[in-house]
Image: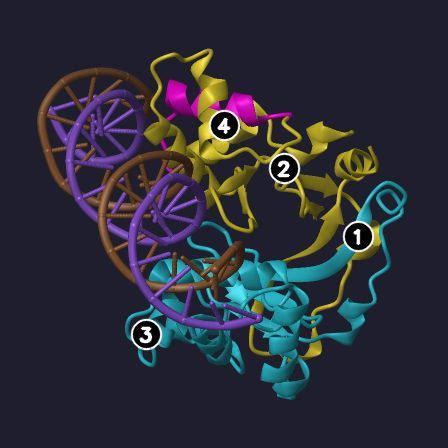
Chain colours: A yellow, B cyan, C purple, D brown
DNA sequence: GTGATTGCAAACCTTTTGCACGCCA
DNA sequence: TGGCGTGCAAAAGGTTTGCAATCAC
């Protein structure tokens, strides 16, 4: 639950924007603030619905473009999905994902033994590996409980 | 390269259809045959383009629905993507993926040390884990070569 | 001031749905 | 024969693009 350690603060966010010559607009700040502390992996539309509460005339396009820009500068990650809309992860630290094949929820988890996987023999000489993530598939707690009812 | 071991033969495919009370139609057989031996992860439209050569009046809808049906009965997998169209994997055996963040290509690889990851402590009691896959991100060989040119 | 960014609208791509016809079991 | 599966068309959902007005620097 040490979420703070995984996510950029507003100060580092502003600095990241400056480093990339990106203008600091109210829209970008509002979107960034909504993302901090989220434990979920919202779609652009979900972010739009959240931000709209504070910023009633923001457009979905802006949210979309902003999230893609954030992904380019490393403020968010685009996470793997199995069809449907793109999903964004405000937690860019090293972690892994559990995907529920029933409800589609993506659940973050940490596991030290997954964090130091070695580079595979047959790839490491020809490919440049930047990140490694383990994806588990199965049924989440909530869906298992529904089934038994 | 022992692809044959990883994919269903036409006989087991037909049996799988029967087991699931699915009718064996020329469209389904044609789609299945195009998928066997593929080392790639085509979209529905890519499969449609391939099958159309032999089956000129098949519709994209049928290909789409067939691939979803195949996923339900375990003949193909829906693989993780980072936005864009669904991609299907005819190889349903245990393997892992390298994702090139430049060209978007998904490259299969095998790695025995990745195959026996233990279930994570904090999830295994509440979640039912069905499969584990490692996703590497980075630059593939081809993209590295383009960059240096 | 000026170039990046925004909001709007339209276009585009992919997937889903409804329906009548046809074909497999 | 009966019902599943197909092809067509339309709709829906998500993303991208072009453009004029606006805003941050």
Residue A60 lies in quadrant:
top left
Give whichever of A46, A116 is nearer the camera.
A46
Dot 2: what SS? loop
Look at discs 1 and 3 and give the one toward the viewer.
3
Q: Nearer the viewer, mark 3 or mark 2?
A: 3
Q: Where is residue B112 in the image (x, y as percent from the top left)?
A: 78, 75
Q: Nearer the viewer, mark 2 or mark 4?
A: 4
Disc 1 is attached to a residue of which chain?
B
How many labels sit on residues?
4
- Residue B87 shows in the view: no
Task: Find the magenta span and give its range.
Answer: A21-37
Whether callout 4 and callout 1 share a subunit is answered no
4 or 1: mark nearer the eye: 1
- Please tell me if label 2 and label 4 are on a single chain: yes
Check disc 4 and report the residue beneath it.
A46
Chain ID of residue with mark 2: A
Q: In this view, does A20 lie to the left or right of A35?
A: left
State how far apart marks 1 and 3 are (Cα).
38 Å
- Left or right for A100, reference B67: right
Does the magenta-highlighted stretch encompass residue A33? yes
Q: Which residue is drawn at 61% across and 41% down?
A: A92
Name the residue tied to disc 2: A91
One can see residue A37 in this view: yes
Of the numbered discs 1 and 3, the one sitting upstream in the chain is 3
């Amino acid at each position: 639950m040490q979420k703070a350690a995984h996510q950029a603060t507003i100060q580092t966010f502003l600095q990241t924007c400056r480093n990339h010559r990106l203008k600091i607009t109210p829209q970008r700040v509002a979107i960034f603030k909504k993302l901090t502390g989220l434990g979920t992996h919202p779609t652009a539309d979900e972010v739009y619905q959240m931000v709209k509460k504070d910023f009633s005339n923001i457009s979905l396009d802006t949210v979309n473009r902003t999230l893609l820009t954030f992904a380019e500068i490393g403020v968010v990650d685009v996470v793997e999905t199995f069809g449907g809309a793109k999903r964004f992860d405000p937690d860019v630290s090293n972690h892994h994902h559990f995907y529920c094949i029933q409800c589609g929820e993506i659940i973050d988890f940490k596991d030290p033994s997954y964090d130091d996987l070695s580079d595979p023999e047959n790839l490491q000489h020809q490919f440049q590996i930047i990140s490694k993530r383990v994806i588990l598939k199965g049924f989440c707690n909530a869906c298992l409980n529904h089934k038994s009812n």
